Amino acid sequence: MEVWTIANQKGGVGKTSTTVALAGIAAAAGQRVLMVDLDPHGSLSMYFRQEPDYTHKSTYTLFEKRNRLNKELLLSLIRKTPLPTLHLLPAATALATLERQMHACDGLGLVISRALELIKEDFDLVILDCPPVLGVLMINALAACQQLIIPVQTEYLAIKGLERMLHTLKMLGRSRPTPLSYVVVPTMFDRRTSASVQSLRALRNEYGDCVWKGKVVIDTRIRDASKAGVPPNLFSPHSSAVECYQRLYDQLACHEILTDGEHRCAS
C-alpha cells in the first residue's frame, strides 16, 4: 500500500481537487483507493455528500479511540463513493478541537500511521487531504506518507506560501529516518493572464526541478464535477484538467518526479 499526502500551508490552492482527481484516476485504473479527509472544514467529505457537522464516524474517531483501534472499527468508518474501488474516510468538524483536547497525549502524531497499518492489505493507494495549517493533523499526514504532493496555485501569494511549507518539511525532516519525497504541482494555471504566466515562471526559476514539469490548467469542469459529486475523470474524462492530472498520476505512480527533503531531485 502506498500513501500520498496532499498538503500546503495555504488554502485555496487546489488540495481537495487534486486529491479527488488523482484518487478517481487511480480507482479507474483498477487500484483500490482510500481518500482520508483530515481537514476540519471537510471539503473532501462534502464533495461526496458527507456533512462534517453531522458525521459521527470519521477521522476524528481514529484520534478519539486511538488506544483501542482495530481493523473492524476502522473499516466501519469508511464510506463508498460512485466508483466501486474508491472509498472515503470522512472528516468531522470536531477535528478542530484536537489540539486543545489532546495536546498532552503521547504518540498523537502517529495515529494515522498506526491506523493505516491495520488496513494495508485492503487498499493499494491511500491519499490524505490536509488542512492548510501546521498542526497535529498535518504532522500525522506527513508522518504517514511516502510521497508528498504540494499543489501551488500560479499566483504570487500562493508561491510565497510555498516557502512556509518547505520550511516545515525541513524541520520535520530531522525526525524522519529518510527524507520525505515531494513534488510541487502548479495548479489553476491560466495562460490568458500575465499574472499566472509570470507566477509559473517565477515558481520554476525559484524551485527548479522540485516543480513538476507539467501544470494543471484552470478548468470549470472541475467545479462542475464537484457539484455532481463525482471524480472529474468520471464526469468529464477528456477535459483539460483531467488530462493534466492523468499525466501527473502516471508519473507519480512510476516514481518519476520526486524530490527528497534536502532538495535533491530524482528526475
Image (spheres, rainbow, N blue to C red):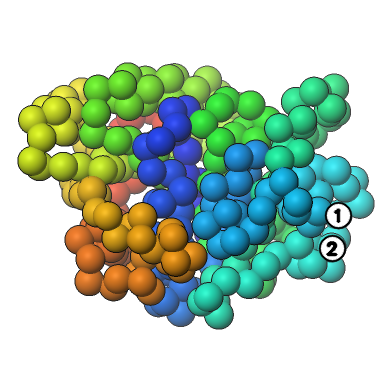
- Around disc 1, counting alpha carbons within 10 Å, would you say few (fewer than 14), some (14 to 19), or many (20 or more)? some
| Amino acid residing under circle 2 | Leu
* Image point (86%, 54%), residue name: 69
Marks 2, 1: nearer the viewer? 2
- Of residues 220 and 188, which is closer to you in this image? 220
Residue, disc 1: 69
* Image position, residue 178 (x, y; %): 52, 37
User: Height in image: 86 above or below 184?
Assistant: below
User: Height in image: 203 above or below 94?
Assistant: above
- Around disc 2, counting alpha carbons within 10 Å, would you say few (fewer than 14), some (14 to 19), or many (20 or more)? some
Give the residue at the far right of this rendering. Answer: 68
Q: Quadrant of the N terminus?
A: bottom right
Q: Quadrant of residue 185?
A: top left
- Of residues 152 and 238, which is closer to you in this image? 238
* Image position, residue 258 (x, y; %): 34, 45
251 sits left or right of 141 in the view: left
172 sits left or right of 99 in the view: left
- Element type at mark 2: helix
Q: Quadrant of residue 141?
A: top right
Q: Is residue 204 visible?
A: no
- Of residues 48 and 135, which is closer to you in this image? 48
Residue, disc 2: 73
- Element type at mark 1: loop
- Of residues 212 and 188, which is closer to you in this image? 188
182 sits left or right of 204 in the view: right
CA gap between label 2 and label 1 equals 7 Å
* Image position, residue 148 (x, y; %): 45, 43
* Image point (84%, 63%), residue name: 73
* Image point (38%, 74%), residue name: 234
| Amino acid residing under circle 1 | Leu
